[in-house]
Image: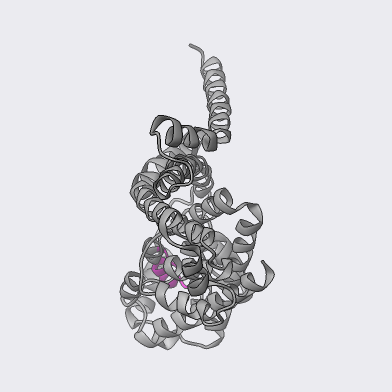
């Protein structure tokens, strides 16, 4: 078969797959209800029926969205290799660098711990500390997994607000931390290795073919979805239990908008925990369904995926405790503000 004909067939197969994906996605709700109440024979309105329908509907919806978006971001990510990202950030004015770093953080791996090695590479390459901290905040907090799950569960308005306010936290917190002149709290070995890291040659990704970029997208799907699918199942299972069995009045009293202390409590509870967006957002959806305030549960989610004890332990390799504590405090303060803003605006 000629290469042109082969490419045409692959394009037709991709288009057919997208049409099939869209048709299945549109009918997931009806399919979940049919499986729950007709096939399984559960009673409508029962606690168990509500939990099972929630689980059967959310699992394929989340996984389908993840596959589609992770593939697309995997392709985009090939244009932003670590070396090219360092070149984009190095030598920029700090305020401009904070914005670029926050934006670039949205197309990096979504786990806070996996973003730390890139953060270390940026510091050793001479990128300003405040700029690298903007990247470190944005990478786990504002990422494709969080955004696609928020869009799928709450719509584009909530996802857009989360994106905008998450970027504001990353930009402003990084700028503030840069103004505090905390470089002396970076471990000395980092700056001793700066010249070596800067002079090291690396592929900037500009020579990749589109076939290689598509393959990178498929690899991203295999690696990322392969890592998070279990978290998706566990998170949705917890959310299904909350959806079916937790009384609405209980969650409204604990995390409602009328309780001023609910947002700080949510952040304090979230920081010691460690989970990714795939596991925590289904829980957030279930909490909202039971009367919890949107700002409160999103503050909880931001604290869980944006700040974590494993992240602090890894950062200790390059940062001294005072800087880590300052970093956590500034970001937690930004999350508090976002939580209250969501509760006021929505």
Q: Is residue 41 above or below residue 166?
A: above
Q: Is residue 295 above or below residue 2?
A: below
Q: Is residue 331 above or below residue 150?
A: below
Taken as a whole, is the magenta stretch helix, strand or loop? helix
Span shown in magenta: 118-127
Indicate the quadrant containing the C terminus: top left, top right, bottom left or bottom right.
bottom right
Residue 302 showing in the rendered view: no
Q: Is residue 122 magenta?
A: yes
Q: Residue at x 48, y 32 (%)?
A: 34
Residue 222 showing in the rendered view: yes
Residue 156 in percent (x, y) is at: 64, 52
Between 247 and 63, which is closer to the camera in this rendering?
247
205 horizontally vs 158: left or right: left
198 horizontally vs 150: left or right: left
Residue 7 in percent (x, y) is at: 54, 21
Q: Residue at x 45, y 35 (%)?
A: 37
Between 236 and 122, which is closer to the camera in this rendering?
236
- Residue 25, located in which quarter of the rendered image? top right
- Residue 242, located in which quarter of the rendered image? bottom left
């Amino acid at each position: 078969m000629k290469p042109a004909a082969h490419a045409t067939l692959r394009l037709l197969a991709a288009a057919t797959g997208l049409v099939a994906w869209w048709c299945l996605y549109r009918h997931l709700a009806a399919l979940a209800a049919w499986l729950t109440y007709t096939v399984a024979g559960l009673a409508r309105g029962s606690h168990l029926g509500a939990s099972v329908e929630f689980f059967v509907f959310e699992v394929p919806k989340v996984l389908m969205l993840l596959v589609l978006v992770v593939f697309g971001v995997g392709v985009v990510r090939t244009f932003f290799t670590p070396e090219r990202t360092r070149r984009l950030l190095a030598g920029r004015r700090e305020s401009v660098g904070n914005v670029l770093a926050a934006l670039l953080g949205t197309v990096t791996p979504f786990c806070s711990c996996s973003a730390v090695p890139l953060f270390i590479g940026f510091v050793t390459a001479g990128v300003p500390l405040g700029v690298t901290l903007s990247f470190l905040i944005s990478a786990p907090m504002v990422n494709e997994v969080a955004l696609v799950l928020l869009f799928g569960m709450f719509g584009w308005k909530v996802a857009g607000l989360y994106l905008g306010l998450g970027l504001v936290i990353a930009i402003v917190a990084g700028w503030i931390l840069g103004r505090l002149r905390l470089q002396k709290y970076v471990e000395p070995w980092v700056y001793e290795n700066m010249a070596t890291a800067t002079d090291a040659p690396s592929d900037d990704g500009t020579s990749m073919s589109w076939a290689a970029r598509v393959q990178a997208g498929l690899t991203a799907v295999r690696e990322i979805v392969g890592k998070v699918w279990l978290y998706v199942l566990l998170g949705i299972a917890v959310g299904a239990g909350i959806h079916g069995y937790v009384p609405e009045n209980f969650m409204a009293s604990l995390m409602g908008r009328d309780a001023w202390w609910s947002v700080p409590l949510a952040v304090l509870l979230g920081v010691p925990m460690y989970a990714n967006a795939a596991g925590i957002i289904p829980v957030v959806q279930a909490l909202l369904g039971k009367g919890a305030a949107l700002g409160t549960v999103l503050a909880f989610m931001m604290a869980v995926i944006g700040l974590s004890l494993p992240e602090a332990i890894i950062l200790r390799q390059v940062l001294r405790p005072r800087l880590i504590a300052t970093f956590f405090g500034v970001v937690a303060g930004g999350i508090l503000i976002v939580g209250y803003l969501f509760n006021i605006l929505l």
